[in-house]
Image: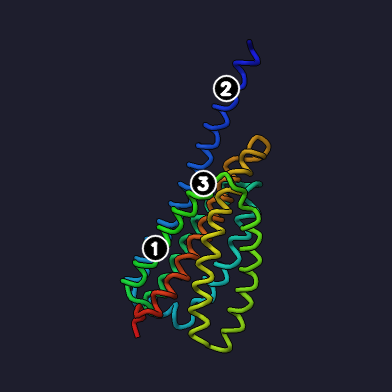
Amino acid sequence: MNNFDQQPRTTVNTEVGLNSFLTKMFGWMGAAVLVSAVTAFYMSTQVTLLQSLHGGSLWIPIIVWFILPFVISGQSMKRPTVALVGLFVYAAVTGAVVSTYSLIFTKEAMTSAFVSAAAIFVTMAGIGLFTKRDLSKFGTQATAALIGLIVAMVINMFLQNSFLTLIFSFVAVIIFSVLTAFDTQRMQQMYLKYGDQVSVTGLAVNGALQLYLDFVNLFLQLLQIFGMFGGNND
């Protein structure tokens, strides 16, 4: 009789714990996006500072922008609170970097890119949450494709081929869409497998960071696409 009662209780506890974990992860990810949006909007109103960043003072935020995710990921399991603070600091730095795009792209293009990125993100995250299919194969292929794409993008920086840039942006949107679904499913599976062995807060921060990066990259690539179709300030 006791064994019969124990199984439903375990299942309910697992579901409650998973829901709490997902709420934290998506909540912090959403909060980070909000911090970036508010920072970008505020910075876009500071014309002098914006022009200074765009004119040559941007290299420090750019360096921080590339390094900080590795620091946050490394600290997420050791010092979850520090990692969470780092996530929001990174979100603010990202907002400052993105604000310089307002000198290049129209407000309409930036708004369209943001809304489109949000729609794609929600759709793919939903697929990652609810699909019964294992997305590991797709995630591995998308990661490999991303590495190849980065190499191609670096080469194209010297070629300055606008058509290739457009093609690369479309490919990148597909890659980060797949990664959004994969990362969502992967973090859910990690909680179910290791949730009782590691810091749930740290795991949620790590997941929030990964999903935030997926969203930001979706936004930046969509912005590039909208910019090429009449969304430039030139």
Name the residue nearer the viewer: 171 or 27. Answer: 171
Q: Mark 1 and mark 3: span between their CA atoms? A: 21 Å
Q: x and y percent of residue 233 in the render?
A: 34, 82
Residue ID for mark 2: 8
Whether residue 226 is situated above or below residue 78 in the rendered picture: below
Residue ID for mark 3: 25
Q: What residue is drawn where x is 37% and y is 79%?
A: 229
Residue type at mark 3: give it. Answer: Met
Residue type at mark 1: give it. Answer: Ser
Q: What residue is drawn where x is 63% and y is 40%?
A: 199
Q: Mark 2 and mark 3: span between their CA atoms? A: 26 Å
Quadrant in which residue 55 is drawn: bottom left
Whether residue 126 is situated above or below residue 170 in the rendered picture: above
Residues at marks 2 and 3 touching, judged by CB atoms closer than 8 Å: no
Residue ID for mark 1: 116
Name the residue nearer the viewer: 117 or 49. Answer: 117
Number of the front mark, 1 or 3: 1
Q: Which mark is residue 228?
A: none
Q: Quadrant of the N terminus?
A: top right
Q: Tell me the SS state at disc 2.
A: helix
Q: x and y percent of residue 148 in the render?
A: 64, 73
Residue type at mark 2: give it. Answer: Pro
Q: Tell me the SS state at disc 3.
A: helix
Name the residue nearer the viewer: 64 or 139. Answer: 139
Residues at marks 2 and 1 touching, judged by CB atoms closer than 8 Å: no
Instruction: Left or right? Give the position of 138 relative to 25.
Output: right
Q: x and y percent of residue 50 in the render?
A: 39, 76
**N-terminal label among 1 and 3:** 3
